[in-house]
């Protein structure tokens, strides 16, 4: 790492600063300094002693200065990292790498009162149920921030659940999940979520081919009955919801579609999705002597297929499409082929990542088993399509001539996976097997086109990097200062916490030119496996701190019809139905006693009438699995059958004031003597 010049400069600057301070203290400068020189010198000595005592290198000191965030100062960037099989989404400040929030998406999370009885949430979870089962976990892979004009706009974030083919919609006005949709065609997904440059569509690509719509077919019918898919979710920005009725899916051959990306600028209107297992291996390890495991069966071909999808044509065809599966608009493979909705490009070799360069002009594919990244030119792809420079495959899909559309191949190292971009004309590719991040140059119109398609630097990481995320790295205008490597193995990096180790997120400085990549910081992530992440400039985010009005329903983003102000608290009974309107404010609930009978049906509204920032009240009820977090201004509702008699103390779970322990009350459920209980 050629940082030595930079350190020399930093050293000279530091000496100059101290000299200036001394000059000012001794009256040698024009400006009046408020910092006495003795402090500066004292600080210098203490810092020097600390550096010596801890044996820090100048690289360490540089890294510390680059990442340290003084108390009360905010990070300039915010990373949204998938939480893997925690089912959630993590929000992390960059460069300090402090966890700011976990957004619960697919899994209930008690501390944020998510999934423990609140009615709007229960309804939302039910929308995401899978074949009638209340699945309460997910495997999140690819968060996608909403975009306007190809730039993150800070309004929404979407994330997929690979395990169940679901998509979650999070509103960044309050960082809360508002919608879960279950894909009616597929059992699992992977190549999503990603958005079109103005977020009209949220795209979810498939993974393991299966009979569409959850049907059954024996594995021996794989070629005829199993299919891949890609789903186009129509997003309504006003409502902040995916519109099921205007969404649709397209059938694809039974290859295993993997990651996808959206075209932008020149390539806007095109979708790129790669695939593996074009061998159509059906596995079967353990089921007989001839069975070939997927691991080798799906890795035979030198080339798999990049899917190049004509989005505008697909939208037109979908608008007049009659075919439905599970009541969902579904373009059959036959129609897709007849209408020329997509093309294939050969891509080496069991590819994983496909990433579109900031100007939309190049598509970068990494073959997991090929030491190169392969770069395709959008121009050349369009020319090949125009000239019909293709051979149809056995499904009739045009396969473009590889040599006609390939722009370059750059040898980077072993196990290339994912690529990101900066503002200096460099691309960055993660190398899983090498445990490294490679920096290389783009050609075309980018800054380093004079040395185009050249490996420039490789930074070792620890260990086995999956995705990498650069600041605004998926947009038309990446920032180019920081990159985070999301590593799969941490092995020896942290204190031993037993055999299940944290993931390791490593922050890398990419601000310099040439061979200047430097590792800055290790962040253990002990709450799920982040796959992908996106990093946004913090200034683009404008969440509320207190809901706009007292009695706010965060799901409807409007005042709740059961909003309860101070003085409006009451309990009403209509036969066996009991309804409670309660308020919470430091440090009491009103009413504090709720007396009902066993067998009553209870609907209970609680309004946090606080308007102070951070004045959250919890509501925990034993035995009934009720646990709420009610943010300032919010109205929450729970509904339950009072089938267990007894005395139940409900209480506030947030230490909200000196008298927080007194913030409690009794639910008294009289036994129903008629039933003999
Ligand atoms: S994947 Cu996990 S390292 Cu789901 Cu995008 Cu590549
Ligand atoms: Cu409210 Cu503790």
Image (tube, rainbow, N blue to C red):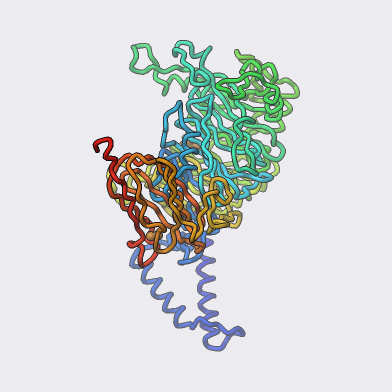
Residue at position x 41%, y 37% in the image = 137
- Residue 598 in sight from this viewpoint: yes
Q: Position of residue 151 (x, y in %)?
A: 65, 47
Left or right side of 641 for 258 = right
Residue situated furthest bottom in the rendering: 27
Residue situated furthest left in the rendering: 676
Q: Position of residue 409 (x, y in %)?
A: 59, 33
Residue at position x 42%, y 45% in the image = 578
Q: Position of residue 387 (x, y in %)?
A: 75, 22
Residue at position x 69%, y 36% in the image = 268
Which residue is more in the foreground, 433 or 322? Answer: 322
Which residue is more in the foreground, 534 or 571? Answer: 571
Which residue is more in the foreground, 641 or 328? Answer: 641
Instruction: Point out the quarter of the image occupied by ligand 2.
Output: bottom left
Residue at position x 55%, y 37% in the image = 193
Q: Position of residue 313 (x, y in %)?
A: 71, 26
Would you identify the image quadrant in which residue 366 lies? top right
Q: Looking at the figure, which quarter contains the C terminus?
A: top left
Left or right side of 492 for 582 = right
């Amino acid at each position: 790492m050629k940082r030595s010049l930079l350190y020399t400069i930093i050293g000279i600057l530091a000496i100059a600063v101290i000299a200036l301070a001394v000059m000012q203290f001794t009256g040698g400068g024009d400006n009046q300094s408020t910092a006495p020189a003795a402090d500066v010198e004292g600080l210098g000595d203490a810092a020097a002693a600390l550096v010596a005592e801890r044996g820090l290198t100048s690289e360490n000191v540089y890294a510390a200065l680059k990442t340290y965030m003084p108390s009360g100062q905010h990070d300039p960037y915010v990373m949204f990292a998938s939480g893997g099989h925690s089912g959630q989404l993590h929000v992390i400040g960059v460069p300090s790498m402090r966890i700011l929030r976990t957004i619960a998406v697919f899994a209930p999370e008690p501390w944020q009162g998510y999934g423990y009885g609140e009615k709007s949430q229960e309804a939302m979870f039910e929308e995401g149920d899978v074949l009638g089962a209340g699945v309460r976990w997910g495997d999140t892979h690819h968060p996608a921030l909403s975009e306007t004009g190809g730039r993150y706009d800070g309004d929404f974030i979407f994330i997929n659940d690979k395990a169940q083919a679901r998509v979650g919609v999070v509103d960044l006005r309050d960082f809360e999940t508002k919608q879960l949709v279950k894909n009616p065609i597929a059992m699992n997904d992977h190549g999503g979520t990603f958005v079109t440059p103005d977020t009209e569509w949220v795209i979810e690509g498939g993974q393991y081919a299966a009979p569409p719509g959850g049907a059954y077919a024996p594995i021996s019918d794989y070629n005829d009955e199993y299919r891949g898919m890609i789903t186009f979710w129509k997003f309504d920005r006003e409502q902040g919801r995916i519109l099921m009725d205007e969404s649709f899916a397209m059938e694809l051959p039974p290859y295993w579609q993997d990651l996808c990306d959206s075209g932008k600028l020149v390539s806007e209107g095109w979708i790129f999705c790669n695939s593996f297992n074009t061998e159509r291996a059906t596995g079967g390890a353990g089921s007989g002597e001839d069975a070939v495991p997927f691991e080798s069966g799906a890795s035979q071909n030198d080339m798999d297929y990049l899917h190049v999808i004509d989005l505008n044509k697909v939208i037109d065809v979908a608008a007049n499409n009659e075919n439905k599966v599970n009541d969902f608009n579904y373009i059959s493979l036959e129609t897709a082929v007849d209408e020329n909705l997509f093309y294939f490009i050969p891509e080496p070799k069991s590819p994983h990542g496909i990433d579109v360069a900031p100007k939309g002009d190049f598509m970068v594919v990494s073959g997991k088993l090929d030491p190169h990244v392969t770069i395709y030119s959008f121009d050349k792809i369009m020319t090949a399509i125009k000239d019909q420079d293709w051979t149809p495959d056995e499904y009739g899909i045009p396969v473009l001539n590889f040599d006609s559309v390939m722009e370059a191949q750059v040898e980077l190292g072993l196990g290339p996976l994912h690529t990101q971009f900066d503002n200096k004309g460099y691309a960055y590719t993660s190398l899983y097997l090498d445990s490294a991040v490679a920096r290389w140059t783009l050609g075309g119109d980018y800054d380093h086109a004079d040395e185009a398609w050249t490996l420039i630097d490789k930074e070792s990481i620890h260990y086995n990097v999956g995705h990498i995320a650069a600041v605004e790295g998926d947009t038309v205008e990446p920032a180019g200062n920081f990159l985070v490597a999301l590593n799969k193995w941490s092995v020896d990096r942290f204190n031993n916490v037993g055999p299940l180790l944290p993931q390791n997120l490593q922050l890398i400085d990419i601000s310099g030119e040439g061979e200047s990549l430097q590792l800055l910081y290790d962040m253990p992530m002990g709450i799920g496996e982040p796959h992908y992440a996106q990093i946004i400039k913090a200034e683009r985010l404008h969440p509320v701190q207190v809901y706009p009005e007292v009695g706010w329903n965060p799901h409807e983003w409007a005042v709740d019809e059961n909003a309860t102000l101070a003085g409006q608290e009451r309990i009403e009974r209509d036969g066996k139905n009991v309804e409670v309107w309660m308020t919470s404010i430091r440090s009491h609930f009103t009413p504090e006693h709720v007396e009902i009978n066993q067998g009553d049906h209870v609907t209970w509204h609680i309004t946090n009438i606080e308007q102070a920032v951070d004045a959250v009240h919890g509501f925990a009820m034993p035995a009934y699995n009720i646990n709420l977090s009610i943010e300032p201004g919010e109205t929450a509702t729970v509904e339950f059958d009072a089938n267990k008699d007894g005395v139940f103390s409900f209480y506030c779970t947030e230490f909200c004031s000196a008298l927080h322990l007194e913030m409690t009350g009794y639910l008294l459920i009289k036994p129903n003597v008629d039933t003999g209980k």
